[in-house]
Image (cartoon, rainbow, N blue to C red):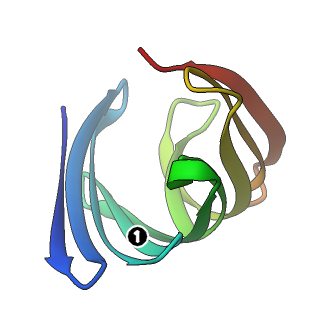
C-alpha cells in the first residue's frame, strides 16, 4: 500500500507527503515521507525526510537533490542526489535493524528524438558496516 500527495503552493514551491507499508517475515514497516521542492527556471532543488516505523523501532533519513532540465522544451534532465541517515535493513538472520546510510546518485534523462530517449543512474550507497553498493542503470524510454 502506498500513497503520495504533491501540492503546489505558489512561486515555484511544492510540498509533498507520503506513506507506504511493507510486509516482511519479521513484521510490518510503515514509511512516512515529507518534502519541499523549489523550482526556479530550469532548476529544481528538493529536500525529503523519511521515517520508518517497525514495532516501536524507527529510523530517519533525508535526501537533498538538485536537477537541471535542458534542451528544447526542457524535457531532458540531469540531477544529483545526496542521502544520509539511518534505515531499516533485513540482515541474513531475517532480523530488521537500523543501520547508518549515506549515498550519492547522479541521474539523467535524454531524449534522442520525439519518441525515444535514454534514462541512466550511477551511484554509491553505503549501508553502514554491512556493505557498499556501487552501480548504475540504463534504460530506454518511449513516448506514445
Name the foreground residue: 130 vs 44.
44
Q: Extreme bottom residue here?
A: 11
- SS of the residue at dot 1? strand
Is 134 on the left or on the right of 60, as rendered?
right
For the point 25% across and 60% down, the residue is: 56
Question: Where does the C terminus fall, quadrant-wise?
Answer: top left
9 or 74, which lies in front?
74
Left or right: residue 81 compared with residue 124 = left
The image position of residue 54, as x and y in percent, is: 29, 51
Q: Quadrant of the N terminus?
A: top left
Q: Is residue 127 visible?
A: no
Check disc 1: other Cα within 10 Å, few if <14, some if 14-19, many if 20+: some
Residue lying at 56% horizontally and 69% vertically, measured from the top left: 65
- Residue 47, how many percent across, how many down? 44, 75
**Relative to 116, is 73 above or below?**
below
Q: Is residue 130 above or below residue 140?
A: below
> Residue at point 20% right, 50% down?
19
Residue 89 location, x and y as percent? 54, 45
- Depth check: give the residue in front, 94 or 9: 9
Mark 1 lies on residue: 48
Residue 18: x %, y % from top left: 22, 55
Is there any visible trace of residue 92 in the rendered image? yes
Amino acid at each position: 500500500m502506498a500513497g503520495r500527495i504533491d501540492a503546489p503552493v505558489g512561486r515555484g514551491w511544492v510540498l509533498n507527503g507520503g506513506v507506504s507499508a511493507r510486509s516482511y517475515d519479521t513484521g510490518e514497516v510503515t514509511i512516512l515521507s515529507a518534502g519541499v521542492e523549489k523550482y526556479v527556471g530550469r532548476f529544481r532543488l528538493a529536500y525529503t525526510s523519511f521515517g520508518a516505523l517497525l514495532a516501536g523501532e524507527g529510523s530517519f533519513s533525508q535526501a537533498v537533490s538538485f536537477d537541471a532540465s535542458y534542451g528544447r522544451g526542457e524535457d531532458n534532465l540531469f540531477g544529483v542526489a545526496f542521502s544520509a541517515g539511518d534505515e531499516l535493513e533485513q540482515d541474513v538472520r531475517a532480523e530488521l535493524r537500523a543501520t547508518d546510510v549515506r549515498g550519492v546518485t547522479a541521474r539523467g534523462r535524454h531524449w534522442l528524438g520525439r519518441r525515444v530517449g535514454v534514462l541512466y543512474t550511477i551511484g554509491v550507497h553505503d549501508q553502514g558496516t554491512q556493505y557498499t553498493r556501487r552501480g548504475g542503470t540504463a534504460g530506454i524510454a518511449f513516448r506514445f
